[in-house]
């Protein structure tokens, strides 16, 4: 962290004022840096954005979502954390639209938030971002999410998980998706929109556009039979325990007036 950035982080922390213990746990230096970057270093705007996130987390309670709350949404493997990372050890989230199995707007958003929260558990200490791979094989307009869900998804990711996306890989997207992508564009932050990379397994040239982040020799980009629901359930139940133990730090601090540890966010 350079001197200017350090100064702005301290300024933002001061502007936030008194925080309760769980807010302190959430608002690490790394967290404040992300919100500052998301608002181009503007402390006032970063403060407003972060305050909205704290309000959202207080009401939505993402840390309290458990596996059983999203198990139905996850049955077909339409969204899950991959068992591999990128070259920097960053978590990879796989999304497979053809495996959509519900029409629940709230259920789909809850699964999104749950997946994001659990992915943070696997961030290396020197990294803050994830990669997304959206596998469009077999996708059609009938599998497209309603605009309402797309809009809310973009809002949650951009406003409550800012600067989390490193690269978004659009895998084997059909031509018709180009129209859908243009329809979605107004709801997506321009910087986020530019992080999308379209690749096709039949085109070796396009694959080279992601060789800076993935070892192409070890990743075949074929996710048809990769997801095992029962095995993934065991991993997520273990992650639920990790999440519970982490946030209990805030409860412990409230009881002892001790100093909290920083979240790696």
Image: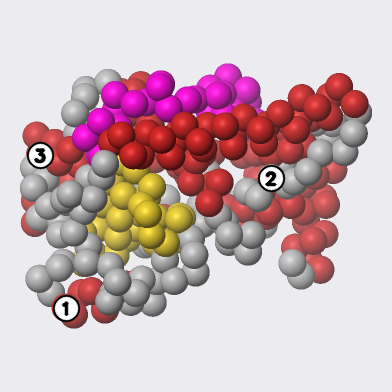
Residue at image location 58% in from the left, 19% down from the top: 59
Residue at image location 86% in from the left, 22% down from the top: 255
Query: Which numbered disc covers residue 107?
Result: none
Q: Which scheme is used to colour this image of the protein?
A: secondary structure
Q: CA distance from mark 3 to mark 2?
A: 40 Å
Residue under label 1: 204
**Residue 61, horizontal then vertical, whole percent:** 56, 24
Quadrant where the image shows the N terminus: bottom right
- Determine whether, in the image, residue 128 is placed left or right of residue 16: left
Mark 2 surroundings: few (<14), some (14-19) or many (≥20) residues within 10 A: some
Going from N to C along the chain, the mark reached first, 1 or 2, is: 1
| Image height of 170 relative to 228, above or below | below
Q: Secondary structure at mark 3?
A: helix
Residue under label 2: 263
Give the number of callouts.
3
Mark 1 surroundings: few (<14), some (14-19) or many (≥20) residues within 10 A: few
Q: CA distance from mark 1 to mark 3?
A: 27 Å
**Residue 49, horizontal then vertical, whole percent:** 61, 39
Residue at image location 34% in from the left, 43% down from the top: 80
Q: Looking at this view, is 200 or 216 the one in front?
A: 216
| Image height of 204 relative to 195, above or below | below
**Residue 265, horizontal then vertical, whole percent:** 63, 48
């Amino acid at each position: 962290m350079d001197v200017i950035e350090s100064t702005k982080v301290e300024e933002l922390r001061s502007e936030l004022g008194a925080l309760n213990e769980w807010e302190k746990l959430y608002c690490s230096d790394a967290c404040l840096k992300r919100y500052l970057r998301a608002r181009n270093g503007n402390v006032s705007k970063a403060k407003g954005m972060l305050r909205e996130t704290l309000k959202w987390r207080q009401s939505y309670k993402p840390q309290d979502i458990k596996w059983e709350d999203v198990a139905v949404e996850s049955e077909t493997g339409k969204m899950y954390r991959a068992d591999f990372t990128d070259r920097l050890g960053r978590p990879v989230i796989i999304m497979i639209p053809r495996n959509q199995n519900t029409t629940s707007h709230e259920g789909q958003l809850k699964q999104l938030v749950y997946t994001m929260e659990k992915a943070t558990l696997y961030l290396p200490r020197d990294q803050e971002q994830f990669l997304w791979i959206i596998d469009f094989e077999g996708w059609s307009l009938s599998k497209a999410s309603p605009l309402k869900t797309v809009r809310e998804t973009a809002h949650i990711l951009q406003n409550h998980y800012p600067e989390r996306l490193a690269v978004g890989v659009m895998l084997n997207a059909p031509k018709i998706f180009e129209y859908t992508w243009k329809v979605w564009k107004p709801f997506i932050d321009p910087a986020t929109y530019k992080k999308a990379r379209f690749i096709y397994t039949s085109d070796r040239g396009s694959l080279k556009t992601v060789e800076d982040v993935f070892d192409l020799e070890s990743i075949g980009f074929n996710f048809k039979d990769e997801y095992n629901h029962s095995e993934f359930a065991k991993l997520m139940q273990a992650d639920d325990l990790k999440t519970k133990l982490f946030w209990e730090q805030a409860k412990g601090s409230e009881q002892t007036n001790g100093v909290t540890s920083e979240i790696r966010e």
